[in-house]
Amino acid sequence: VDALNGEARLSELGAAITPDNLVGYLTNRLQVLDWHRSHPELEATPVSPVVFMIGMGRTGTTILHDLLAQDPANRVPLTWEVDQPIPPPETATYDNDPRIAEAEARAEMSHAALPELQAMHPTGARLAQECVRITGCDFKSVIFGSQYCVPSYLEWVTNDADMAPTYQLHRQYLQVLQSRHHADRWVLKSGTHLWALPA
């Protein structure tokens, strides 16, 4: 928040939407943690095997992620379920959950505001989502550096932040997502995992 206030030079629109953006991450975090508290059996549930894609940006990782998602044995976190993980997605309604239409409407608003971004990096409710949106719920994620001009925050998150709690939350997020819609294997993607491999 200090970096947003002191460095980001937010436009009027940016200043209007940023609080909702941050509240959304905080809401998802609190809902995932609350779901774990009310479903303590989840903690003992192993996360399905994970393949982490760690290539740098603009190297074809998005298309590779989408390609690997075509294998029915692979599960990628889709935008709609990352954006609203609670209640956990269910197999019976995974392809027609009402949250899909909500996420698609948000994506279309974003496409209208930034059409050039869609050409560079396709987004949509049913497309694979990067882990930066999950780690954003612990407020230790380079997602904020891609959305805002916050150099002091980026310096901190890539060099000094303790990422172990962030990956603990990431694990809990995956446990929730797979609890009612099984994953044989997760395929996860973020170039920023490179900065946190030990964690």
Image (cartoon, rainbow, N blue to C red):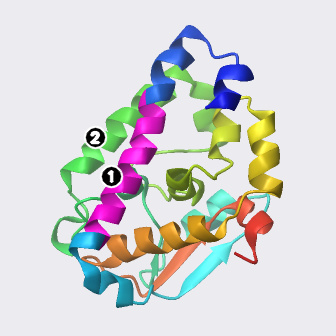
To which residue does mark 1 refer? Answer: 84
Is 3 displayed left or right of 124 in the figure? right
Q: Quadrant of the N terminus?
A: top right
Image coordinates of residue 165 in percent, x first then y, are 58, 68
Image coordinates of residue 157 in percent, x first then y, are 74, 51
> Which mark is in front, 1 or 2?
1
Residue depicted at 31% across the width and 72% down the height: 36
The amino acid type found where label 1 is placed reads Gln
Q: Quadrant of the C terminus?
A: bottom right
Q: Main secondary structure of the magenta part?
A: helix
Residue 93 in view in this figure: yes
Q: Secondary structure at mark 1?
A: loop
Q: Are marks 1 and 2 in contact (CB under 8 Å)?
A: yes
- Neighbour class for label 1 at 10 Å: few (<14), some, many (≥20)? many
Q: Which mark is residue 102?
A: 2
Q: Secondary structure at mark 2?
A: helix
Residue depicted at 66% across the width and 61% down the height: 190
Image coordinates of residue 123 in percent, x first then y, are 51, 45
- Neighbour class for label 2 at 10 Å: few (<14), some, many (≥20)? some
